[in-house]
Amino acid sequence: MLILQTAMLILSSAAFLAAQDDPALAAAKALDQQILKLNTLPQEARPRAIRELAARVRQQPASYVAALAFNLSADSGESDGREVLQDVANTMVDAIHRSPAKYVSGNLYSALASLARYAHVAVSLDDAKYTAAISQLDADDRQRAAAAFTLQDIRGQAWDSKNLRGKVVLVNFWSTSCPPCREEMPDLEQLYQRFRALGLVVLAISGDPVTDLRNYAAAQKVSFPLLMDPDDKVKQQFRVAGIPKSLLYDREGKLVGQTLDRPSASGWIELLSLAGLH
């Protein structure tokens, strides 16, 4: 989480000390704390809260709006709904337009590009840095489309991604130490049970110790394969930076979709439909 890092790093030490009494900075910090508390809200309360926070972010001074918009995007996800994410994206575009370049980090452009690509929101922005962020996503997706692996699961079975043609393959990168990853595991289990007879294969890849993975699988009754990725080599090959991250391949082995974070139940179904599963 950035927590106003973009805005605050540009202040000199003397200016920073003087700014501690700045009412605008105090208000921005208070708003940032409310953004951080989004993850404590029940899911049904999040969409309204995010939209209210987005409206308040757009009212902030140019010095702080970019950092706040980035933090809001980091705490919003696919389960909040496309309309909410569209509002967040609009807030990010507004922040880019209003902020001097020194206040806008490359992370903001990357996050906005990811929303456009993976959450399918509309972004209208004529900006070279945004174009570069889209180009980077294109390069990452080409790498993910071509990447292949052979890994063992926690039972000792080897899985070769090249031998899964004819199956719809959902590759999930996760960790037992990642709360959002653990939260979406029951979703993946439900998908697997619902669609496995139609050819769905779920492969959950983690760099965690095998003992941790076995304990988790036993405790949570996970029935799909948990694959071991020592030193996160496959994760790096697929250019996965943040988890959870899921990539969907159709029966021809073509990358047809991927997640931004944790989709809603309907979002998972929509994702699988890209590979012809209904």
Image (spheres, rainbow, N blue to C red):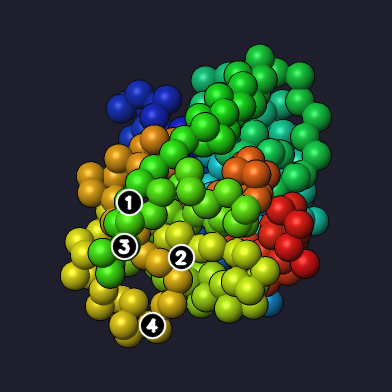
- Residue tagged 1: 151
**First reached walking from the N terminus: tag 1 or tag 3:** 1
**First reached walking from the N terminus: tag 2 or tag 4:** 2
**First reached walking from the N terminus: tag 4 or tag 1:** 1
Q: Closer to us: mark 3 or mark 2?
A: 3
Q: From the viewer's perspective, is 50 left or right of 223?
A: right
**Residue 273 position in % (x across, y down):** 75, 59
Amino acid, disc 1: Leu
In whole angstroms, how far apart are the C-alphas of marks 1 and 3?
Answer: 8 Å
Q: Closer to us: mark 4 or mark 1?
A: 1
In whole angstroms, how far apart are the C-alphas of marks 1 and 2?
Answer: 24 Å
Amino acid, disc 3: Gln
- Any mark on residue 180, and which? 2
For numbered disc 2, what is the local secondary structure?
A: helix
Q: Residues within 10 Å of mark 3 (few under 14, many from 20)?
A: few
- Residue tagged 3: 157
**First reached walking from the N terminus: tag 3 or tag 2:** 3
Q: Closer to us: mark 2 or mark 4?
A: 4
Seen in the picture, residue 150 relative to 273 is either above or below; the reply is above
Amino acid, disc 2: Pro
Q: Residues within 10 Å of mark 2 (few under 14, many from 20)?
A: some
For numbered disc 4, what is the local secondary structure?
A: helix
